[in-house]
Image (cartoon, rainbow, N blue to C red):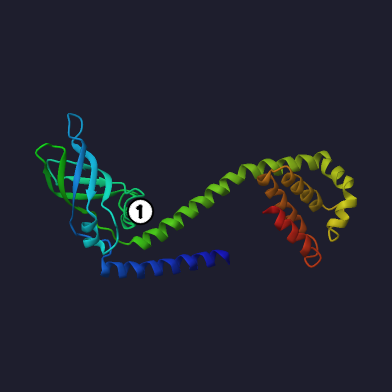
Amino acid sequence: MLNYIWIGLIAFGICVAVGNDIRDEMKNPYRNGVELSGTLEIEKGPGARRSSYEGILIVPARTINAVYGPDLVQEDVRQPVSVTLSSTALPAVTMEPGKDAPALWREMAASASVKGRLTGTVHVLTLSPDGQTALLRFRFESIHLVKLRAVTRAAFDYASTAVTIALGLVGIMALWLGVMKIAEAAGLVTAIARLVKPATVRLFPDVPADHAAVAAMLMNISANMLGLGNAATPFGLKAMEELNSLNPKAGVATNAMCTFLAM
């Protein structure tokens, strides 16, 4: 049932994202195809092993506000960029928008062809006489389907996280369930259950004192007291498995307690 809920939520998110992306295509908030201009303060120029200019691109606030909307920024934007020269194509500009970049640029970079990096083509590159600065006129790459990409990326990221967590728990669960199996075969679990029988009878009145679930619950509590959270999980799951053999009505409270301990 839970799987259907997640699928429904993902489908709903995709539908909403597509609707928002269609609206964005009509309004063009990222100004696809619109040219920007700025001044490049050159720190490194082309050399024998490098065919690019590297430096700080300064885009006046009035230019950004004129393109993207009024009051987007209050000060001129300064961002490190690289301008790569090519003999067969227009120069390419590459930028990784930092925290001082407009929020819209950071949003665009998150959905760019290379995540976190804005690229574009330079249509005008005019060097100053001293070679220290250059006038740039450029266009960023077109940005489309921002919301849809965000939804699908989040779905895959969480799926990957779930797999990573599951694989990490496999080894821990195998180890500690194996330890419990050895303890059962050696009679240690039975001895511990007898030792703490007076307490378990009062803590878990619905569970017989000699039931296998008692040992699992005790080991769960012990693991939690020792700070071994990952080790406590398999014992809690084992206790719930054993409690399934009891009368469901009689074991509701105890099963709820084990569920809490297994978390």
Q: Residue furthest right?
A: 198
Quadrant in the picture for the N terminus = bottom right
* Residue 196 makes an appearance in the image: yes
Residue ID at (70%, 43%): 227
The C terminus: image quadrant: bottom right
Which corner quadrant of the image does residue 253 belong to?
Answer: bottom right
Q: Where does residue 184 sit, x and y in percent of width and height?
A: 80, 43
Residue 210 picture location, percent across and down: 86, 51
Q: In this image, 247 relative to 165: left or right?
A: right
Most extreme residue toward the left is: 129
Q: Is residue 31 visible?
A: no
Residue at position x 18%, y 57% in the image: 35
Residue at the farthest front position: 74
Left/right of residue 24 with respect to residue 167 in the rendered view: left
Q: Residues within 10 Å of mark 1 (few under 14, many from 20)?
A: some
Q: Position of residue 260 (x, y in %)?
A: 71, 57
Total number of numbered labels? 1
Q: Is residue 248 left or right of residue 50?
A: right
- What amino acid type is highlighted by mark number 1? Ala
Of residues 149 and 120, the one nearer the viewer is 120
The quadrant holding residue 21 is bottom left
Residue hosting label 1: 110
Tell me the SS state at disc 1. Answer: helix
For this rendering, which residue is in front, 214 or 119? 119
Residue sitting at x 54%, y 63%: 3
Q: How far across and down, in percent of the image, does residue 64 sit?
A: 24, 58
Look at 31% across and 70% down and name the residue there: 23
Residue lying at the far top in this picture: please name it.
Answer: 48
